[in-house]
Image: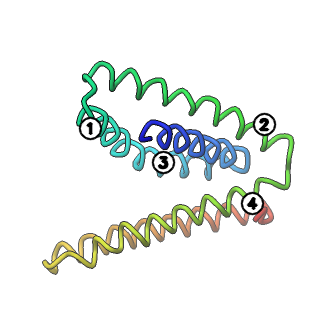
Amino acid sequence: MNLIGDGLHNFTNRVIIAISFAVDINLGIATTIAIIFHEIPQEISDFGVLVYAGLSRMKALFYNFLVALTAIFGAFVGYVLSTQIIAIKPILLVITAGGFIYIATSDLISELNRENKLIKFLISFVFFSVEHWIDVFFKNNFYLEKDCYV
């Protein structure tokens, strides 16, 4: 079940990256960086789940590699969708933004609420704020250049 979910996850992430690059290079780069920071711990945890389930390390790596190949198919599908169906770009961008907002609200903010030490809370808050203003900067530049696709 873990491998099926990971395959679907890899597929959809690469569709999102391909659509983002089709809209704007800056948006594609920002989306790729966000997904990389999300994917590294997710893939490590998938490997750990497979090893904990009883697979050898080599088998777990092999199965993880096979499942990662769905990413190539996802990038191809995203590219084809972005070039053939123009109206799908805004829809997929909204879904992407919603996914990132969901991750931020469900995972990151709940972690802030668990923090008891004020200094750690403030450091996390500052990093989230800086990320927010970087996001606003990229969006403002994106909309100024592109007449607002979304």
Label 2 element class: helix
Q: Earlier in the sequence, mark 1 or mark 4?
A: 1
**Residue pointed to by mark 1:** 48
Q: Earlier in the sequence, mark 3 or mark 4?
A: 3
Q: Which mark is residue 91?
A: 4
Nearer to us: label 1 or label 2? 1
- Disc 3 marks which amino acid? Ile
Identify the residue at the far left of this view.
Answer: 117
Lower position in the chain sequence, tag 1 or tag 3: 3
The Cα–Cα distance between marks 1 and 4, rounded to whole angstroms, is: 35 Å
| Mark 3 → mark 4, Cα distance in angstroms | 19 Å
Residue linked to disc 3: 35
Query: Which one is nearer the viewer's eye here, 112 or 56?
Result: 56
What residue is disc 2 on?
A: 80
The 10 Å Cα crowd at callout 2, few under 14, some 14 to 19, many 20 or more, is some
Residue 52 located left or right of residue 142: left
Kindly report the distance in space between the C-alpha atoms of the residues bearing marks 4 and 2.
Answer: 15 Å
Mark 1 and mark 2: Cα distance apart in space? 34 Å
Closer mark to the observer between disc 1 and disc 4: 1
Mark 1 or 2, nearer chain start:
1
Give the residue type at disc 2: Val
Secondary structure of the residue carrying numbered label 3: helix
In percent of the image, x 18 and y 72: which residue is there?
120
Residue 55 image position (x, y, % from top left): 28, 26
